[in-house]
Image (cartoon, helix red, strand yellow):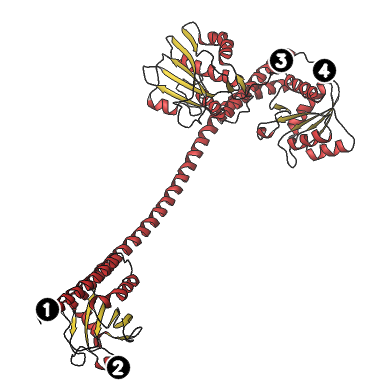
Amino acid sequence: MEKKLASERESEHKALAARWSIAAEAMEALAGARSLDAIVNVLRAFARRAVGADGIAVVLRDEDQCHYIAEDAMEPLWAGQRFPAETCVSGWAMEHHQTAVIVDVFDDPRVPVEAYRTTFVRSMLMVPIGRIDPIAAVGAYWSEFGQPTDNEIALLEALARAASTALENGRLFSSLEALNDQLDHRVRERTTELERSQDSLRQVQKLDMLGQLTGHVAHDFNNLLMPIVAGLDLILSGRRTAESIERHATIAMQAAESAQSLVQRLLTVARRQPLATKAVDLPDLLAGMQALLGSTLGPRITLSVDLQPLLPTVHADPHQLEVALLNLAVNSRDAMPDGGTIRITGEARRSRLPAGLSPGQYVCLTVTDTGTGMTPAVKAAAMEPFFTTKPSGHGTGLGLSMVHGLASQLRGTVEIDSAVGKGTTIRLWLPVERAASAKPVPPVQDEGLPVRSGKVLLVDDNDLVRNSTRAMLVDMGYDVVDTDRAESALNLIESGNRPDILITDHIMPGMTGVELALRLRVDHPNIALLIISGYEGVDLIAPDITRLSKPFRHTHLQACIAAARAQAA
């Protein structure tokens, strides 16, 4: 008898351990549940086996009703049905925040007897889910009358507590997700606002810079236009002599050439200057500048040039590079009113490059002076167009900005290292020439060109430019036919009015000068081609077509015509 009792106790212990094992598995699954559906699925899968019941149901509170949303039972119960909360056991458990233990469903005032009469349920447990405000309940049902055991009650309550924790975690995660969504939305809104503000600020800065630039340019151009207008006005007046005409015309020409130089400087600052780049040997270039630098710097400045041996050639426009070095030298000279030393050094570098430079080999040209140096504010603004610390009339403020523009256009950069009382160092980084340089072509001489006869077709949509160019061509001895559109010029040629040379502006309404030139190169390769450009679109002109930049003088036009005719011959 004792052995039988011991065996029964052992079986009970094993069964109980198995149920707690199932409950532990259920609680582990509930720990990862983040939604009500996931919690319901776990309870439906584990609760009946954990408590050893003949059925379980999961009930959800829906305002004043109890909705039986899921069940796992030996026979169907009430899945999908709703009952008034005040008439069902689940409503009582949720309302009173406590477990309902029903020994006999037909002898308990909390039980709607008629709802249970047709079911297998004779005893039951109903446990609320949700610590603060229960929103659900889980019920366990048995087909026999009797008191549920303490272990059965503890197991179901443990599952309900785990479900409550899962619900709270789900609410927390939902709140966090909602908060994250709100934060993301606010961040996006704020980012959009900041971008709008930054765009507005950039626009204001652009307008401010444009206003400053316009003011400086207007001031300088008005100063240059004044002697031109005054000289021409005096020439056109009735009181003139041959000597006065020559004097006024000379002054006007000097002012016009200064205006042309100012335009070139502005283009360099804007990094839009047409460059004639090639392989430049820096020792040769600096050797050729020695006399110019010496006369410019004066006797009180000591110039030292120390370049690395076997320095590679750089990719640059030699003329513009000379202008840049001259500007740097003049700035250094002006920073040393009592005299001093300027040292120019150069070395090839592949590593420790300034930020923004593409990987590769560069030559770093360094210009160092022993002058007064710059304050932090001056250093920060030094490369801005028209910024200068010199007295009025002693500088345009374009020197360093021109150097920076040239370096940027050549895919290099400029660095400034300066402090008050410690002098200034400017580092000009230039890319090394990669391809072997072509054999240089001897330049066409401007002076002494013979007057050549022939027929010119001149195309320009600007009446003033076309008339002045036509007058130059006639003075050279050419027969000139002119028109204001490329299409008209093409019709003239196709109708048999074939010129020896076509001179055309580039940017015009309709067909451009480049399009006209390329058409003639195919259909009439023996016609010499010369394109005149005021700058816009100059990058689109084929490099093997002779081109001339406005404004130009008589000798420049004559030299370019000779070059174009030599190329077409």
Question: Disc 2 and disc 4: Cα gap in Å?
Answer: 125 Å
Give the SS element for disc 1. helix
Of pointers 2 and 1, the one earlier in the residue sequence: 1
Q: Position of residue 472 (x, y in %)?
A: 78, 23
- Quickly name the residue at label 2: 118
Residues marked 2 and 3 touching at CB (< 8 Å): no
In the rendered image of this protein, does residue 494 appear above or below residue 21?
above
| Label drawn at residue 451 | 4
Of pointers 2 and 3, the one earlier in the residue sequence: 2
Question: Hey, which quadrant is residue 525 in on the image?
Answer: top right
Q: Is residue 253 left or right of residue 453?
A: left
Question: Disc 2 and disc 1: Cα gap in Å?
Answer: 42 Å
Three-letter code for the amino acid on which mark 2 is drawn? Thr
Tell me, yes or no, if residue 440 can be seen here: yes
Three-letter code for the amino acid on which mark 3 is drawn? Glu
**Badge 1, how many Cα within 10 Å: few under 14, some, many 20+?**
few
- Quickly name the residue at label 3: 246
Q: Is residue 84 left or right of residue 369?
A: left
Residues marked 3 and 1 touching at CB (< 8 Å): no
Of pointers 3 and 4, the one earlier in the residue sequence: 3
Q: Is residue 285 left or right of residue 164?
A: right
Judged by depth in the image, the label closer to the viewer, 2 or 3, is: 2
Question: Disc 2 and disc 3: Cα gap in Å?
Answer: 127 Å
Give the SS element for disc 3. helix
Say which of 395 and 185 sits in front.
185
